[in-house]
Image (tube, rainbow, N blue to C red):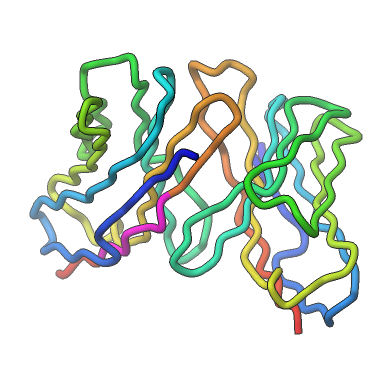
Amino acid sequence: AQTVTQSQPEMSVQEAETVTLSCTYDTSESDYYLFWYKQPPSRQMILVIRQEAYKQQNATENRFSVNFQKAAKSFSLKISDSQLGDAAMYFCAYRSNNDMRFGAGTRLTVKP
Amino acid sequence: NAGVTQTPKFRVLKTGQSMTLLCAQDMNHEYMYWYRQDPGMGLRLIHYSVGEGTTAKGEVPDGYNVSRLKKQNFLLGLESAAPSQTSVYFCASSNLLAVLDTQYFGPGTRLTVL
């Protein structure tokens, strides 16, 4: 079965600095998608960034970027110029066909 | 455009009681999903639907039933609630096109089973 592992239960970053959240996954599929979701205290899951496995170029969305290492099955999220509003739980997720798996999450604290 | 909505937001049940959670989406999405979120475990897929009138089991389907009678609605039922079903439940929907397979989530329902 596919698994997603986030090895950092908690991380903190100073406002305006950069932080990287780690994610590794295990799969035998060749075609899949990877996601990072943000979950603020409101509990709603918000898509941060998406990466298609067939694309070698790393996805970027404004201050958010990923480091996708397909051979190593690694998918880390980098948040640049951290803002107080970035504080939340971050979930890494994997999807192939109708199989969707989430990691256990990393709680990010942003210090002013 | 409300996106994905869930009712109720909170519910407390006694063991053995039944209830239905309602998910509605107004984006004309084909796919709909039900997840549960437990502390330290991330989200786990309970059931999903690839279209009106169809449902399929996910990772943790036992103790739950679902129905998709209308394209915009996806119902999750608990016939005989157990304390192990205490969790936060999320509904999501997505477009049929796999290349734009972004899931849109509802705000969640916190269910406590005593």
The quarter of the displayed image where residue A75 is located:
top left
Horizontal side of A59 relative to B36 (left or right) equals left
Horizontal side of A99 relative to B71 (left or right) equals left
Relative to the observer, which residue lies in front, B59 or B45? B59
The quarter of the displayed image where residue A105 is located:
bottom left
The quarter of the displayed image where residue B13 is located:
bottom right
Residue at x 13% of width, y 48% of height: A81
Number of marks: 0
Residue A57 spot, x, y in % from top left: 21, 18
Q: Determine the residue located farthest toward the bottom in the rendered image.
A: B114
Q: Which residues are magenta?
A: A103-108
- Where the C terminus of chain A falls, by quadrant? bottom left
Relative to the observer, which residue lies in front, A103 or A84? A103
Residue B57 spot, x, y in % from top left: 73, 40
Residue B49 spot, x, y in % from top left: 75, 33
Horizontal side of B103 relative to A71 (left or right) equals right
Residue B29 spot, x, y in % from top left: 69, 27
Residue at x 16% of width, y 49% of height: A20
Horizontal side of A54 relative to B16 (left or right) equals left
Vertical comparison of B80 with A45: above or below:
below
Vertical comparison of B35 with A99: above or below:
below
Residue at x 90% of width, y 63% of height: B79
Residue at x 77% of width, y 78% of height: B12
- On whether residue B80 falls in the magenta region, the answer is no
